[in-house]
Amino acid sequence: MKRSPFFIKMFIYFPYEKKGLLSLLLFIFIGFSLYAQETYRTECKDTRFRTLTVRNSSNWLLPPMIQLGGNEFIHIDFDLFDEKSERLYYSITHCNADWTPSDLNETEYIEGMNDREVEQCEGSFNTYANYFHYRLTLPNARTAFTLSGNYVVKFYSPSNPDEVFLIACFYVYENSVSVSAAVSGNTDISFNQGEQQVSLSISHPDLEIANPEEDLKIYVIQNHRPEQRRYVQNPMIISPTLLSYTHYPHLIFEGGNEFRRFEVLSYSQAGLNVDYIGYDAPYYSASLMPSESRLGKPYIYDKDQNGKFLVLCSNSSNPDTEADYLKVRFFYPTDLPFLNGKLYVYGELTGYKILPQYEMCYDVQAKSYVGELFLKQGAYNYIYVVVPKNEPNRFSSVMEGNHWETENEYLTIVYYHPIGEKYDRIIGVNVVHTQ
């Protein structure tokens, strides 16, 4: 580990009688630095890369997870905007339940080689935007997983492995226990109002769990959203082969509303919820239909994809390289701007992040919030969220409405880490939908 030059200089030039105290402070500083581990999430860390997806090979709507030793794969796809393709390498890291690196050596969780080159790369074809499409499939002929758990793949240049361009996260699970989940609008705080409550049970006849309060970590995630990830620890009912988690206040979620949708599949015809499409050099642009507030309005079912997007384009056999990029303009009309917060576009299309490039700006003349994202052709889901001025780490989708009937996806992940083990095993998962 590199020491800060500032601390080194202070140590050299500080008066002798104070070096003892300074040594102690330096020791504490280094100690904290060593234990401050990065928490990973799927993201592009370099602006040249776009449209990063992590998918189950059998069903793109599923969470990014595969069974250990199963027949499914993880596909990691992304595009590079540059004049020429770049050699990219990847490394695989096993993580704890909280997405910090585990204490395992890579030889303990990987069979084969780590730090290998991404071999699948293809240039775009017949598009206004020039890019190179990359795909990594795991496991593959050179790399296989030997343990369950959270996994992170980092992509980098072989000339500078410390500079990570992209991070992709996914789960490898076992079926050592059976996880059941149910969702109800009849919650411990309301009856068919705006909330949904999740109840869980874990059947483990073939696995002895001596101390479930300490050995298990259970997470429930609504619609893949990082801020909607809830931790469950103590079961309400414990029997020899069954654990029950009911009436758990922490498993009450806002029902929210269905995601808004739009499709941009062709330049010759406006797609779903697209008002206008035209050429705006050097790319095409698509203006969406104005979005109305759904606060206080009755619930209307719409078959969304719970926040995800799918790259598609008309008359194409390979949208990965034949889909073009275009400027997509969002409109949210309101007579007055929000006084106490900022409006953002949110969903997988923004990497589930609140960043300046996803902020909507208020146009006084148009009496509307306006925003623009540079996106690949396809079918998209999104919602609007408001971030309070004085609370940048908290946001709300209150203007979208809140309904107990909303179709939501809940992913449950059960981690097992008994005394003596070195890592968090994923011993069971469950995906349940409310409708």
Image: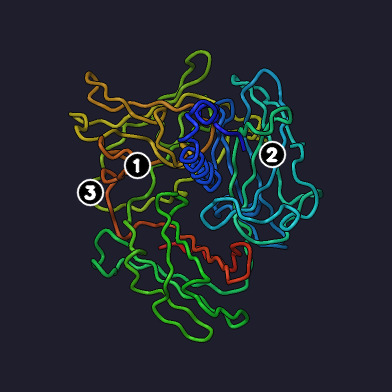
* Callout 3 amino acid: Lys
Residue 319, image x and y in percent? 63, 35
The answer to whether residue 41 of the structure is visible from this angle is no
Q: Residue 9: which disc?
A: none
Residue positioned 40% across, 37% down in the render: 354
Query: Which residue is farthest front?
Result: 17
Q: Residue 297: which disc?
A: 3
SS for callout 1: loop
Quadrant in the picture for the N terminus: top right
Residue 267, image x and y in percent? 52, 25
Which image quadrant is residue 250 in? bottom left
Residue positioned 51% across, 40% down in the render: 23
Q: Residues within 10 Å of mark 3 (few under 14, many from 20)?
A: few
* Callout 1 amino acid: Asn
Mark 3 or mark 2, which has the lower sequence index? 2
Cα distance between the residues tagged 1 and 2: 33 Å
